[in-house]
Amino acid sequence: MTLTPSLKEAMLSAVPSLRAFAISLSGNIDRADDLVQETLLRAIANIESFQPGTNMSAWMFTILRNLFRSEYRKRRREVEDTDGSYAESLKSHPEQASRLEFQEFRAALAKLPPDQREALILVGASGFSYEEAANICGCAVGTIKSRVNRARTRLADLLSIEGSEDFGPDQTARAIMAAGGRG
Amino acid sequence: MKEDDKPGRPGSMQTEVTQRKPRGRLGREVQNKIGQQLRAMYDDVVNDGVPDRFVDMLRKLDEEKKDEGSAA
C-alpha cells in the first residue's frame, strides 16, 4: 500500500477527531497537536501496514493512543495537572454558562483513570462501537464496556448529577468546589 | 454489567469485595447528560477543522519527495 492522494485525504479528514481525542487524553492543546503530528508522521511511515478498505480513522486513533500511552508512562507526574492548563487554553465560548460547564466537565474528566477516560471518549464522543474501541485499546469488548460504565458512574459522582436534577447553578458551584477542594 | 457476573478465578482465595452500590446502574437521563457534555466538548474541537500546520506538513513532505525524485 503506497501513500496515494486519497489515503492522504483520509488521513487529513481524520485530523479533527484525532485532535479532539488527543485533547481529551492529554488535557493540553499544544501536546495534543504534537501528538496528532507525530501520529500523521507514523501513519505515513507505516502506510504499508494499513489494510486497504479498513477504517483509516480507527487505525490512526490506535497509533495516537499508543503514542500517548508511551508518552504518558514517561511523564506521568507532569500529566497530573491537566485540568488547569486546558481550562486556560479554552477559547472563549459564546455562552458563558456553557463554557463554565465545559470547564467543570473537563476537570471531572481529567480525574478519571486514563483507561476509563479513553474508553468513554471513544464510545461516547468519537462514535466508535464497543468492538472498534476494544481494537483501538487492544483489550476485550467486555473490558471496554465496564470501563465506560465505571467512567459514567464516576463522572456522575464528580459532577453531582442526580437523576432528577438538572445542571443548575447549584450543581455548577458544587462541582467547582469539589474539583478545587481535592487538588 | 456482565463483567460482574464473571466467576473469579478458581485458584484465587482472596475474593475481592467489590463495592456493589445498590443503586448501581445510572439512569438513562444521567447517561444522556454526560453524553451531551462529552459530545459538546469533543465537537468544539472537531469544529476547528484541520489546522493549517497539518496541511502544510503533508504538502512539505510531498515536496521533499518530489525533490528526492528529481535528484535521483
Image (tube, grey):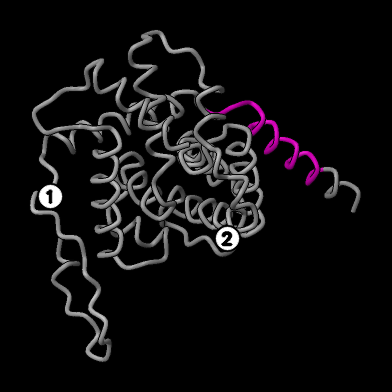
Q: Which residue is mark 2?
A: A1
Q: Amino acid at mark 2?
A: Met
Q: Which residue is mark 1?
A: B25
Check the image and report above or below for A180 versus A25: above
Q: Which residue, as the protein is rendered here, is positioned at the far right?
A: B71
> Residue A55 in the image: x percent, y percent?
41, 52
Q: Given the image, on which type of amino acid does mark 1 rest? A: Arg
Looking at the rendering, the stretch of residues picked out in magenta corresponds to B50-66
Q: Residue at x 59, y 58 (%)?
A: A73
| Residue A135: in magenta span | no
In the image: residue B44, left or right of residue B64: left
Q: How many residues crowd around disc 1 within 10 Å: few (fewer than 14), some, or many (20 or more)? A: few
Residue at 44% from the left image edge and 40% from the top image edge: A110
Tell me the quadrant of the picture where the N terminus of chain A can be found.
bottom right
Q: Nearer the viewer, residue A153 or A65?
A: A153
Residue drawn at x 16%, y 22% as measured from the top left: A166
Q: Residue furthest bottom?
A: B11
A19 over A137 or under it: above or below: above
Q: Distance between the Cα atoms at labels 2 and 1? A: 46 Å
Using residue A163 as the reference point, say whether residue A31 is left or right of it: right
